[in-house]
Amino acid sequence: MAGSSNQITLSENEKKALKLIIEAGEEGLLQQDLWKMLGIDSRDGSRIALRLAKKKLIYRELVTIKGRKTYRLTALVDKIPEEEEEKKEEKSETKYVRRPPRPVRLNVKVSMKLVSTVPCATCPNLQRCAKGQFYDPTKCKKLNQWLQRLAVKLQQKKSAKQESRAVEATA
Ligand code: SF4
């Protein structure tokens, strides 16, 4: 349907960028590589990535590579929306469906050491804690802080691995 809320207009460079990001699959593409592949400068590259993220077509994840901060870009769609629109002319009922954001993949090996650090393990309110109750895990400051620290640690590990893989690849 013309004028549908799912209709998204992309510039030629945005289409090219999105295509590259989709082709990069789950590993995604570093923003610093994207603008080089497109033959544009870093400022234009980051503007394009930002616009695609605002249109909810990609996910931008802040990462540190060789000590420098950049963004890992992963696609939230598996097709370029306008290509889907073109197909509509052939198949009138084909609709562009936006995928829900993919959660960040974290390769976590659950160890007893890790489990023993969960604040709930020693919390006196554990028996009374449930969603919607006075003690609510979704609002618990202690649990949230623990999860944030864990996420930072895992992200640092992941970045260190990616960095060492990048160093190996260039060696
Ligand atoms: S979520 Fe918070 S209040 Fe609930 S058991 Fe865990 S630490 Fe205790």
Image (cartoon, grey):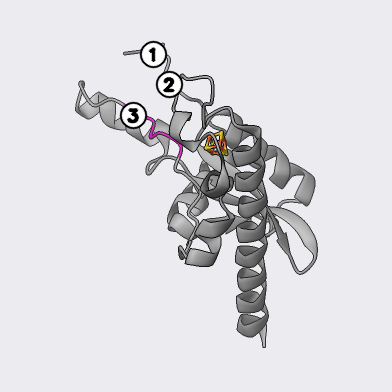
**For the residue labelled by badge 2, is the local secondary structure a helix, a strand or a loop?**
loop
Q: Are marks 1 and 3 in contact (CB under 8 Å)?
A: no
Magenta: main secondary structure equals: loop
Q: Is residue 161 left or right of residue 70?
A: left
Amino acid type at mark 1: Ser
Q: Quadrant of the C terminus?
A: bottom right
- The alpha-carbon separation of the residues under discs 1 and 3 comes to 12 Å
Query: On the image, which quarter does residue 100 sit in?
Result: top left
Asked whether 68 or 104 is in front, the reply is 104
Is the residue marked 2 within 8 Å of ligand 1, measured from its CB?
A: no
For mark 2, what is the residue? 7
Helix, strand or loop status at disc 3: loop
Q: CA distance from mark 3 to mark 2?
A: 10 Å
Please report the residue visible at 80 percent of the width from the left and 65 percent of the height from the top. 67
Q: Position of residue 61 (x, y in %)?
A: 62, 47
Residue 37 seen in the figure: no
Query: Which residue is denoted by mark 3 in the rendering?
Result: 97
Q: Which mark is residue 4?
A: 1
The answer to if 55 sits in the magenta stretch is: no
- Mark 1 closeness class: few <14, some 14–19, many ≥20 residues within 10 Å: few
What residue span does the magenta drawing correspond to? 96-101
Q: Determine the residue positioned at 47% across, 44% down.
A: 103
